[in-house]
Image (cartoon, rainbow, N blue to C red):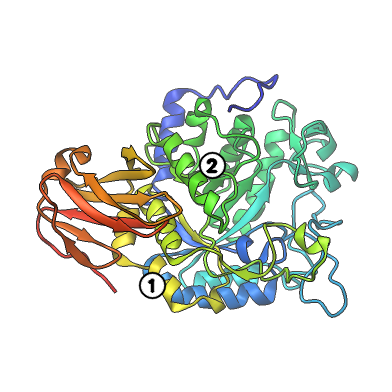
């Protein structure tokens, strides 16, 4: 499904200019990024205390495995009401947001009374990149107050706002009409502010269906004087017609929000399948965050409708995936070259989950940076193959049991192409060699489980922990 056609044409930047910019941008992320994002565990309620604790845990638990980007997601600018005796808010979205005199978001006085700068500085001290979430557009608060746009002769936020362009799930913003005077200047001013703080990564939300605003954002990043990695998230549907625009970013989401539900494994497969033939060339297809461990910590189940309707999905819990489903989930991400952004509360994450998301063999496949392809499908058994970009006789494949019950049978190796002739197959999750029976493998897989295989004609045994 494609987004509705708007009255604006798609961006008209010339192909050589786009390609030059794409190459420059993609040099910032030569491999799919890895990091942590606050949304799955803290929704819109991440605050100074929990962010600082998770930053220290991140440095200890994930940074050594190459996870290097720490992201505060939605709501860091919201002046939330926190009921007496509660640790977090009971509002889905804040009634008020904090903006400066030029209509740009500032850190919430409620959640971040010392601002974001101490966190940013500490992240950089630890060798970690710091990221934030941003809604597309201009704050309604800036429009209502007619706040002046920095660097323009008397233009205000009201002059660039398209008040008919609103997000259906978040009331903070109006869309920006990029054809109006002052529109680009506004976006330029926003990213200049973020650059002055030392921001390294920005996840822009409600934007994947708005190619012209994406172009305005990428132009603003070009002008801000700092290298900033850009991640694009959904509002409307992703469209293959906008791939040239998506390639101006570093990551682009190919699914809606993914949670710890069995049907979300299927949604991930569908998202992966939708992009396997696209000309990605350096922009990473994002299958969304890793919802493992303690989730929705900020929203304990109080037995009322209000708890069920806050940002995110569900109430405080340990994730509902089985061990097999977690293996399937992370194997998908590795074979698809998807970014890995852990979503669980890190101070409470157990060692079994940490071993899974820091497994050297899995991370080697993800860092390979080649989006795997569906090679075989029959009776709810999928085989996806990812070649090694440096060696044609090496690679990885996954045999996924997409049945809700155990499966036993034979899987042909011929669909692997030239790789099927390799004599060296190693089961990464079980750390055992595999011996084919001619051109087949005989397997037994638990419900929703996966066989994750490294193909290595050299006979080298992959690293394990």
Q: In this view, does 391 lie above or below 406?
A: above
Residue displayed at 57% across by 37% down: 219
Residue 396 place in picture, x, y as percent: 25, 51
Residue shown at 42% from the left, 26% from the top:
16
- Can you tell which mark lies on residue 355? 1
For mark 2, does the 10 Å Cα neighbourhood hold few (<14), some (14 to 19), or many (20 or more) residues? some
Q: Which of marks 1 and 2 is nearer the N terminus?
A: 2
Residue 228 appears anywhere in the view:
no
- Asked whether the viewer can see residue 320, the reply is yes
* Percent position of residue 125, x then y: 50, 74
In this rendering, the count of numbered labels is: 2
Residue 48 is situated, as x and y percent measured from the top left of the image, at 69, 73
Q: Which mark is residue 127?
A: none
Pointer 2 residue? 222
In the rendered view, does 12 fall on the left or right side of 149?
A: left
Quadrant where the N terminus lies? Answer: top right
The answer to whether 229 appears left or right of 276 in the picture is right
């Amino acid at each position: 499904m494609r987004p509705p056609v708007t009255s604006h044409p798609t961006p008209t930047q010339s192909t050589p200019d786009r390609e030059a910019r794409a190459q420059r941008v993609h040099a910032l992320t030569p491999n799919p990024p890895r990091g942590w994002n606050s949304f799955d565990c803290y929704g819109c309620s991440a605050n100074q205390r929990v962010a600082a604790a998770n930053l220290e845990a991140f440095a200890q638990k994930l940074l050594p495995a190459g996870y290097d980007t720490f992201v505060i997601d939605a709501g860091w600018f919201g002046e939330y009401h926190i009921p007496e005796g509660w640790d977090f808010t009971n509002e889905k979205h804040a009634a008020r947001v904090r903006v400066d005199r030029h209509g740009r978001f500032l850190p919430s006085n409620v959640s971040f009374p010392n601002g974001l700068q101490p966190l940013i500085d500490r992240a950089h001290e630890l060798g970690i990149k710091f990221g934030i979430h941003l809604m597309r557009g201009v704050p309604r608060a800036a429009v209502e107050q007619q706040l002046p746009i920095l660097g323009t002769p008397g233009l205000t936020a009201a002059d660039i706002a398209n008040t008919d362009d609103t997000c259906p799930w978040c009331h903070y913003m109006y869309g920006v009409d990029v054809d109006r005077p002052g529109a680009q200047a506004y976006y330029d001013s926003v990213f200049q502010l973020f650059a002055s703080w030392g921001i390294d990564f920005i996840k822009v939300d409600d934007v994947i269906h708005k190619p012209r605003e994406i172009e305005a954002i990428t132009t603003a990043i070009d002008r801000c004087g700092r290298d900033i990695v850009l991640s694009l998230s959904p509002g409307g549907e992703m469209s293959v017609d906008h791939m040239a625009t998506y390639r101006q970013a570093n990551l682009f989401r190919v699914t809606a929000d993914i949670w710890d539900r069995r049907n979300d494994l299927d949604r991930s497969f569908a998202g992966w399948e939708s992009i396997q033939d696209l000309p990605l060339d350096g922009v990473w297809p994002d299958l969304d965050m890793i919802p493992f461990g303690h989730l929705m910590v900020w929203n304990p189940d109080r037995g009322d409708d209000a708890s069920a309707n806050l940002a995110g999905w569900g109430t405080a819990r340990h994730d509902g995936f089985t061990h097999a489903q977690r293996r399937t989930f992370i194997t998908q991400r590795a074979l698809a070259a998807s970014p890995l952004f852990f979503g669980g509360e890190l101070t409470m994450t157990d060692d079994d989950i940490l071993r899974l998301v820091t497994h050297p063999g899995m991370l080697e496949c993800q860092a390979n940076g080649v989006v795997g392809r569906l090679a075989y499908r029959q009776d709810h058994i999928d085989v996806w193959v990812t070649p090694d970009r440096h060696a044609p006789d090496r690679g990885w494949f996954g045999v996924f049991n997409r049945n809700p019950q155990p499966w036993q049978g034979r899987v042909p190796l011929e669909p692997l192409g030239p790789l099927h002739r390799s004599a060296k197959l190693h089961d990464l999750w079980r750390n055992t060699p595999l011996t084919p029976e001619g051109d087949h493998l005989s397997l037994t897989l638990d419900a929703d489980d996966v066989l994750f295989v490294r193909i290595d004609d050299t006979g080298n045994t992959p690293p394990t922990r």
